[in-house]
Image: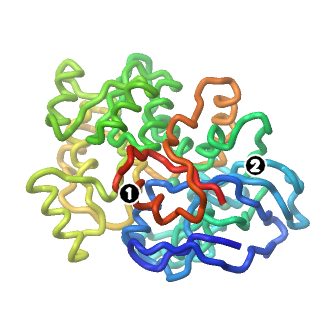
Amino acid sequence: MKAVCWHGAHDVRVETVPDPKILNPRDAILKITSTTICGSDLHIYDGYIPSMKPGDIIGHEFMGEVVDVGHEVKQLRRGDRVVASSIVGCGQCFYCQQQKWSLCDNSNPNGWMQEPLFGFGTAAIFGYSHLFGGLAGSQAEYIRVPFADLGSIKVPDHLPDEQLLPISDAFPTGYMGADLCDIQPGDTVAVWGCGPVGLFTIRSAYLLGAERVIAIDRVPERLQLAREKGGAETINYEEMDAGEALKEMTGGRGPDACVDAVGLEAHGMGLEGFYDKAKQAVRLETDRPHVLRQMIVACRKGGTVVVMGVYSGFVDKMPMGAAFNKGLTLKMGQMHGQKYMPRLLEHVLNGDIDPSFVFTHTLPLDDTKHAYEIFKHKQDRCVKVLLKP
Ligand SMILES: [Zn+2]
Ligand SMILES: [Zn+2]
């Protein structure tokens, strides 16, 4: 089959590789009908995620048709159309039982590799390095899905792929970001980053009852989407100080909750931004936590700060004194896809949201290299690319 293989920073190639096979009785094989590039794939593309090996197949947001199932798969049959969660969970461990699917104890055979860094191993993620299980990714014609009954949700035929695909990863990530804000009537939520996850956080915050959402970015077309499709008020942080603007827009109190939909490669401004880039370049700091610092200072006292953008290692100059003295609640994590997918599908079927608004481009899998470039550099007004194997 054809698949997108990683060969180092900024080097992805479409290659011919062996087709996946059923390895365990609870596996299914999907023929992928649509996949995409997630913002967190850019961290792999840019070489910031450790334990990648040349030839690894990348990608984790996907949907397709079931073409084969192991003998213990009960819910799925050949020919079913499904969307699959980017996170793999076993359904039986302490964490899966509590719907904390991204913390699964059993899905990541390389969990031991995470222990020196994280203390404990976390769930496997498709196409996301050996640290996260070494599973082949979805930017390919076929994929093996472990624990397929749990990680896949059947979808009806009458909706096109672009309305359903985001239920695999970007939509539940954004939705969990809003869910962790514990939104109360009248709340204002501030969202840093208006890429697909940020846009879904905005829409989800309204679905969960926020009164106002304020979005922060610097790319005009993303801010425009946040206003027109998200219903958010927007701040371009290159034109004004985001912290000051938020204070002014909230009558001097600050937002009730703040969500980081940017992660470890934030574009810092000024001296602090330079400091992070310099430290990251010499590997003294793995992540650039500009957004995190700004959220902690901008959030109202007693508010909630949520991190959904990916961090992988260590950060410097965390304003811990501000977080502590303001009594903030910090929440974060990889999303729990299996918990959220059924309710998100229901929102789509009810017409509450049409997730296809995030896609600006459709390209064949053969053009994946070009897709990474326009997505990374936000060229050609690219917000999200639908890739067709
Ligand atoms: Zn993702
Ligand atoms: Zn589990």
> Dot 1: few (<14), some (14–19), or many (≥20) neighbours within 10 Å?
some
Q: Would you say 331 lies left or right of 157 here?
A: left
Nearer to the camera, 211 or 81: 81
> Dot 2: few (<14), some (14–19), or many (≥20) neighbours within 10 Å?
many
Residue ID for mark 1: 376
Q: Is residue 225 above or below residue 282?
A: above
Screen quadrant of the N terminus: bottom right
Nearer to the camera, 335 or 379: 379
Q: Quadrant of residue 271?
A: bottom left
Q: Quadrant of residue 278?
A: bottom left
N-term mark: 1 or 2: 2
Task: Residue at 81% x, 72% y: name it.
Answer: 22
The answer to whether the beta carbon of the residue marked 1 is less than 8 Å from any atom of ligand 1 is no
Task: Residue at 41% x, 25% y: name it.
Answer: 228
Residue 267: x %, y % from top left: 24, 53
What's under tag 1, amino acid-wise? Lys
Residue 21: x %, y % from top left: 79, 74
What's under tag 2, amino acid-wise? Val
Of all residues, the one furthest to the left in this rendering is: 271
